Amino acid sequence: MSEHEHRMEKIVSLAKRRGFIFPGSEIYGGLAGIWDYGPLGSELKFNYKQAWWDFMVRRRENIFGFEASIVMNPKVWEASGHTAAFSDPLVECKVCHERLRADQDEEIKAHEVAHRAAGEEASWTEPKQFNLLVEAKLGAVEGAKTSVYLRGEITQGVHVNFKNILDSLHPKIPFGVAQIGKAFRNEITPGNFTYRMREFEQMELQWYVRPDETEAMAAFDFWKQERMKWYLLLGFNPNKLRFREHGPDERAHYARAACDIEYETPFGWKEAEGIHHRGDWDLARHAKFSGQDLSYFDAETNERFIPWVIETSVGVERTLMYLLLDAYHEEDDRVVLKLHPKLAPYTVAVFPLLRNKPDLVKKAEGIYRGLKKHFPVAWDDRGNIGKRYYSQDEIGTPWCVTVDFQTLEDDTVTVRDRDSMKQERVPVLELDQCLHEKLTAFPAR
Ligand code: GAP
């Protein structure tokens, strides 16, 4: 196993062992491309989505939140072009009938090598386009059930509500609508942990601009930079991030220009997020298919037009996996997840030095309950202090508070820092303030 593969294995194992990410429906043998988020993973995911929401919506004046349904009228997907064009080329191995994506050279090669090792020669069927939309049946009466799709991207829910948004909010162009939610894709080869899933979450901004190429490209460049800034604020290693512009032949059916932010994973440079210039594709198509007027009237210039859209779209689970890979460090005999303190599942852990000294335990419990009013707090009284520190390091808890015999005398505690491992003595009365200050020293929110 290469060192890179080994790193990936360590992340998968830590994620399972410490309650971040579990294979979906594991006791029934799992389900390909489906993962569940455990007690720590769900906290991390929540914090991650909140950081995005704060950065993209709350801090800005002209971006509004939205939450559309997963299931929409099936006509939405005809209009959006997904029933016709949302597909990947699929080939089937004639020897074992496994199906792979024809455009994934590494997987094809690995499959051929495996057959060759068994003395066989893989050969492939001609590529066929395979639609990625997941179908479901809706309705109470058998026979009268309607076929629907689970949304393949969260985008369309915003565009089909464009008129509602204009009528209720009267936003001034340019403006944005942001959304976080589940999307579903019948991926041919789900894999690489949470890199390619069949059920996942997306965080997207639809930014509406005037139909003007100069304005649209200025917005495209602006959002590219803003999105890169976000990863850097979260503490990602800048050397592992890059932009990659799409050539005309690799753009999605709706895109006039597209650029990915990529991350260097143990399995190569891979997409983290897409920034797309969607032109008037979505609104014009929905106007045509629904027969509704989806134009915008600009009272300042007295013009009526269909706006163009610049989109930023990121997968939650995929980039959370990148975040774990990036944060994972082995230092001497400890493993430490150097997560941004605002993302870590617990901000602080509280320990009584000894679990069999009731005075220490009582004091520590009081501090624990007090801190819990303001922060996510862990409690640990097992084993020795060194082991407890290492256990919190491994899940990324930035600070640990130890209640010891001195605490009973002078009402101070030890605060230990995850990254520097330095300890300082802090009065219990100042603990809240001290942790707030440490948190605000980090700029992500
Ligand atoms: N609305 C545009 C759109 O959906 P996309 O490039 O297909 O664009 C955007 O997807 C992001 O969603 C990707 O950059 C990736 O982070 C995430 N994503 C896409 N397919 C995924 C999958 N099968 N598993 C996990 N994340 C996925």
Image: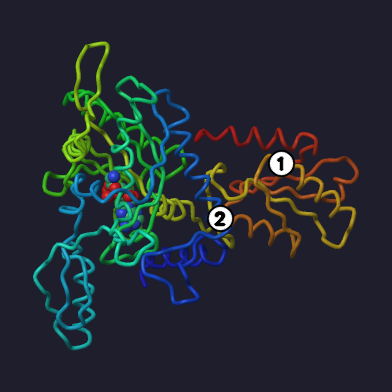
Q: Is residue 85 visible?
A: yes
Query: Which image quadrant is residue 295 in?
Result: top left
The residue beneath circle 1 is 373
| Numbered disc 1: secondary structure | loop
Residue 306's spot in the image, x, y percent? 20, 27
* Image quadrant where residue 305 sits: top left
Nearest-to-viewer mark from 2 and 1? 1
Horizontal arrangement in the rendering, residue 407 relative to residue 25 (left or right) = right
Which amino acid is tagged 2? Val
* Mark earlier in primary sequence (2, 1): 2
Asked if the residue at label 1 sits under 8 Å from ligand 1, the reply is no
Residue found at the very far left of the displayed protein: 126
> How many numbered marks appear?
2
Residue visible at 80% across and 39% down? 428
Q: Is mark 2 within 8 Å of ligand 1?
A: no
Front in this rendered view, residue 273 or 158: 158
Relative placement, left or right, of 75 versus 178 is: left
Q: Which residue is at the far bottom? A: 119
Which residue is drawn at the image coordinates 80% and 51% (left, top)?
365
* Residue 168 marker: none
| Secondary structure category for the residue under label 2 | strand
* Residue 263 visible in the current orientation: no
Instruction: Identify residue type, mark 1.
Output: Lys
Q: Which residue is mark 2?
A: 336
Task: Please tell me whether residue 405 is drawn above or below residue 123 in the rendered image.
Answer: above
Task: Give the class, few, some or many, for how many residues have Cα within 10 Å of label 2's Cα (few <14, many ≥20).
Answer: many
Picture coordinates of residue 19, whole percent (x, y): 56, 62
- Give coordinates of residue 244: x percent, y percent: 23, 44
Point 45% across, 33% down: residue: 55
